[in-house]
Amino acid sequence: MEAASARRDKLRKSMKALGVDALLVTNFTNVTYLTGFTGDDSYLLVHAKGQVVISDPRYTTQLEEECPGLDAFIRPPGMGMLEGVTQALAAAKIAKLGVEADSMTVGFRDQLAEKLPKTAVVTAARLVEQLREVKDKEEIAEIRQAIWFAEKAFAVLRATLRPERTEKEVADDLENQLRLFGAKGSSFPPIVAVGPRAALPHARPTQQLIGSSEFVLIDWGASGRLYKSDLTRVLVTGRIPAKLERVYRVVLSAQEQAIAAIRPGISGHDVDRVARELIAKAGFGANFGHGLGHGIGLDIHEGPRLAAGQHLPLKPGMVVTVEPGIYLPGWGGVRIEDDILVTKTGHEVLTSVPKAFDEAVLS
Ligand code: ZN
Ligand code: ZN
């Protein structure tokens, strides 16, 4: 895989800057990113002159299919991961080894240090995660595909939404539609939240009837081959409550203005502030209790974040959600979420489900 080898070259530059001879990649998603291998239970050792996947016999064939030509150390039955890693490291003659602080257990690190008295084991955090923030062409194409699955499934949901159905039925149906259109499945369990339940940003679908309130919030996404999408819309299923229309228009305008601000060089902090100030001015500042957005990719939540305190500049190739919300306990909530690609000159909105207030009204 050409893309994977280009990613490993970039990683070597980060390793050099950090002063480590090798990095032991223990986060399976990071292993996938760097090799194209989609199995579990396998680590990747990347050093200056090469790399080796440390895996077991269950994956021999899959490794040959997904990353032909990549060196693999297949642990024979009975050999644990610690021994496999130790042998792979000894063969590569590593003096200073970086380990992924966000995924390796303290126990494994201690055992490794004990086994390798001549190797300095140092903490390296987020080296691969930082690379993953900027998507290459293949990744952007896969995200577009994950969005396509999500939008096709939503169009069916919108056309078939009935008052006598439950949140759970609608959520299950949505997941099924995603698969029928070719997705692997949902990128996370979809949220279908009626009326007051929409005030909970992470509501789980229940037996509540769609017709028990005037509106419903739907937060969903698809997993394509490997990459994910993430959207939210609110649909009005009953008569239009004046308060809902007012809240909806505030959220929509906050979202549109924040999206308009996205370009290379602006920070996640500043994009978040655009939406937050507008919502505060409308009197709902206390009711927007989460960050504005997050990166999407191999994981449904990854860097960069659009939130207070995020001062690093956005770069072309980043893909982020923009999802302001206003939540009023006991009444309900509105969130509108789209997926945005940072381009060289500004941004591109990758999602295209209509979101004008009139489009949200089904009745
Ligand atoms: Zn979402
Ligand atoms: Zn999201």
Image: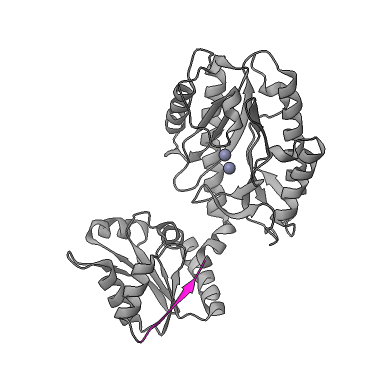
> Which image quarter: residue 352?
top right
Residue 60 position, x and y percent, is: 26, 60
Residue 245 position, x and y percent, is: 74, 23
The foreground one among 94 and 109 is 109
Q: Residue at x 34, y 68 (%)?
A: 107
Report the residue that reaches farthest toward the left.
78
Could you tell me which quadrant the N terminus lies in? bottom left
Could you tell me which quadrant the C terminus lies in? top right
Query: Can you see residue 281?
Result: yes
Residue 342, compared with residue 158, is above or below; it is: below
> Which image quarter: residue 14?
bottom right
Majority SS type along the magenta span: strand
The foreground one among 4 and 339 is 339
Q: Is residue 169 left or right of residue 291?
A: left
Q: What's the colour scheme?
A: one colour
Q: Is residue 343 magenta?
A: no
The foreground one among 23 and 163 is 163
Q: Quadrant of ligand 1?
A: top right
Residue 12 position, x and y percent, is: 50, 74
Read off the magenta span.
118-125
Q: Residue at x 79, y 44 (%)?
A: 277
Residue 53, compared with residue 196, is above or below; it is: below
Report the residue that reaches farthest toward the right.
281
The foreground one among 90 and 62 is 90
Q: Is residue 119 magenta?
A: yes
Q: Residue at x 51, y 17 (%)?
A: 209
Number of numbered tags placed on the structure image: 0
Q: Is residue 228 left or right of residue 292?
A: left
Q: Residue at x 53, y 41 (%)?
A: 145
Query: Can you see residue 346?
Result: no
Residue 99 position, x and y percent, is: 43, 71
